[in-house]
Image (cartoon, helix red, strand yellow):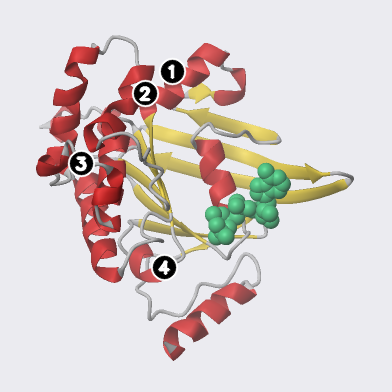
């Protein structure tokens, strides 16, 4: 019906719009350019995987997109708002309300229960009563199938369960954007599969997911794969793992060939 109405709202809302952006770290007299003349757009509802060798700038880019850091130059619009032009208040509202983070090492607080960990982001949102924290936590914990763990402590959970708690925490504010930096990096393959199935399901249910991963087997789950090298996305690959690595634009990074060789050898 929405198509019949011809309303473009759900079809092409640009959530992330990055143009000619760069990031340079300064260490003493040294300047380390990490991102250079980067263009990157993400539409609401997309599931994008970012790959690239260690040190290529994947986490840096995700941190900037998630408003934990900023570009040295260039344009960044998040939800149509120019990020460099935001006041400190608008910045924190955008970050707390619209961004959900999932980290490799879960980042749960060990002295808090699962329900307390999950409801933590609500404390930074205006208009949510403390009396509602637990029921809101219970709702998102049901989504990740951990309804029986509300009062457990992180150390009483497996790695996979801890990551599902972290995903519930990311979901509790109903964010516009889920950012995942190596979400399965600390997990065994079975737990990784469960977490990936969960991210895929969240995407199918409408979430916009931006995931950094080293693992091509996980990246194929995304709709769009981007490879970061020399500060830019050098190629896209939606082809399966067995396909020839994409060339063009820039020379294929050494790590790509190395990774492919290691993949075959293992
Ligand atoms: N705060 C910082 N100050 C100086 N240099 C930094 C800083 N943060 C990152 N870097 C450098 O920027 C480059 C990119 O780092 P980043 O963490 O984004 O890489 P990555 O692609 O996420 O790597 P990995 O796959 O190992 O996680 C690296 O050379 C790193 O040393
Ligand atoms: Mg990283």
Query: Which residue carries the number 1 mark?
Result: 93
Q: Secondary structure at mark 1?
A: helix
Q: CA distance from mark 2 to mark 1?
A: 6 Å
Cβ atoms at labels 4 and 3 below 8 Å apart: no
Label pair 4/1, CB-CB below 8 angstroms? no
Dot 4 or dot 3: first in sequence order is 3
For marks 1 and 3 on the same chain, the one whose residue lies earlier in the sequence: 1
Which residue is pictured at 10% across the width and 42% down the height? 148
Q: In the picture provided, is 201 more to the left or to the right than 251? A: left
Q: From the top left corner, tell me how far across and down residue 1 is, in percent.
A: 10, 32
Compute the Cα span from label 4 to label 3.
31 Å
* Label 2 beta carbon within 8 A of ligand 2: no
Q: What element does badge 4 sit on?
A: loop
Q: In this view of the protein, can residue 36 be seen by the observer?
A: no
Q: Provide the residue designation for mark 3.
A: 152
Tag 4 residue: 215
**Residue 97 numbered mark, or none:** 2
**Label drawn at residue 153:** none
**Crowding at label 3, few (<14), some or many (≥20) Cα neighbours within 10 Å?**
some
Location of the C terminus by quadrant is bottom left
Question: Which residue is depicted at the point 36% across and 40% down?
Answer: 110
């Amino acid at each position: 019906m929405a198509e019949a109405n011809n309303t473009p709202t759900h079809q092409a809302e640009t959530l992330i719009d990055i143009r000619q952006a760069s990031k340079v770290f300064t260490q003493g007299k040294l300047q380390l350019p990490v991102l250079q003349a980067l263009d990157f757009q993400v539409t609401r509802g997309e599931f994008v995987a970012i790959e690239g060798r260690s040190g290529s700038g994947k986490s840096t880019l995700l941190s900037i997109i998630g408003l934990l850091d900023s570009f040295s130059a260039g344009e960044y619009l998040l939800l149509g708002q120019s990020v460099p032009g935001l006041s400190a208040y608008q910045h924190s509202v955008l970050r707390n309300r619209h961004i959900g983070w999932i980290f490799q090492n879960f980042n749960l607080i060990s002295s808090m229960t699962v329900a307390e960990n999950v409801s933590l982001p609500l404390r930074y949102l205006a208009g949510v009563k403390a009396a509602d924290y637990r029921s809101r936590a219970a709702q998102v914990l049901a989504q990740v199938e951990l309804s029986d763990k509300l009062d457990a402590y992180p150390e009483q959970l497996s790695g996979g369960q801890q990551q599902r708690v972290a995903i519930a925490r990311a979901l509790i504010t109903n964010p516009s954007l889920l950012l995942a930096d190596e979400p399965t990096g600390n997990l065994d393959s079975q737990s990784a599969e469960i977490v990936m199935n969960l991210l895929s399901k969240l995407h199918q249910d409408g979430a916009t997911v931006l995931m950094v991963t080293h693992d091509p087997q996980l990246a194929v789950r995304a709709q769009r794969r981007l490879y970061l090298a020399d500060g830019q996305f050098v190629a896209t690959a939606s082809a399966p793992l067995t396909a020839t690595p994409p060339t063009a634009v820039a020379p294929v990074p050494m790590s790509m060939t190395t990774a492919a060789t290691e993949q075959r050898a293992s």
